[in-house]
Amino acid sequence: MAIDHGSRWRRWLERGLVVVGVLCLGWTGLVFAQTRLELHRARAAAAAFEDAPSVAAAVDSAAYEAQGPLTGLFEIPRLGLSAALAEGDDDATLRTAIGHLPDTSVPWRGGNTAVAGHRDNLFRALRDVRIGDVIRLKTPRGTFEYAVRTTVIVNPEDVWVVAPASSAELTLVTCYPFSFVGHAPYRYIVKADRIGG
């Protein structure tokens, strides 16, 4: 009796692809669960510091002069975007949170605060952002609100977008185009101005 080697290889290939598919689904589920857990923690922390000093008090108070890590909750209400806000721009941070770029200012110090997120994860909603949309950062040092002023597409080398500024502003950075597969060639930038100061 002849053995059909072709059908045997097809069966092994099919089984192998099923295993790869299950592993991919498991990894996606794990990342989703981690992101939800970080969001839950950020919301709980934001609720705990609702009584934090106002923006004006935080800016004027000597107790808030030291620049510390930016953590809390990031929200764009119109887009239904709510995510944990964490210090750092490494892959581990951006997998589950919006990351504050460490070399930029923090909101309570004024200047240009820059945050980043993955376009295929938490910042996917930015493709629908509009001029005037409100962005809210809830931190232990107060809640800071910004209104979107402009969006621009730049090259990765265009670091002027995160340069220090004299006014209080927020810069969101993600890769572009949103539907690109692989390492995207451009960066999508959202610039927002502090509301009320």
Image: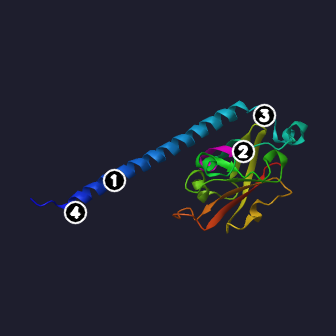
- Disc 3 vs disc 1: which is toward the camera? 1
Question: What secondary structure is found at the residue carrying circle 1?
Answer: helix
Residue, disc 1: 16
User: Which class describes the residues within 10 Å of circle 1: few (<14), some (14-19), or many (20+)?
Assistant: few
Q: Tags 4 and 2 in contact by the CB under 8 Å rule?
A: no
Question: What secondary structure is found at the residue carrying circle 2?
Answer: strand
Amino acid type, residue under disc 1 in the picture: Gly
Q: Tags 4 and 1 in contact by the CB under 8 Å rule?
A: no
Residue, disc 2: 137
Judge from the rendering whether residue 103 lies leftward or rightward of residue 34; answer left or right: right
Q: Magenta span has 82?
A: yes
Splitting the image into 4 quarters, where does residue 178 fall? bottom right
For marks 2 and 1, give the CA distance: 45 Å
Q: Tags 2 and 1 in contact by the CB under 8 Å rule?
A: no
For marks 3 and 1, give the CA distance: 54 Å
- Disc 2 vs disc 1: which is toward the camera? 1
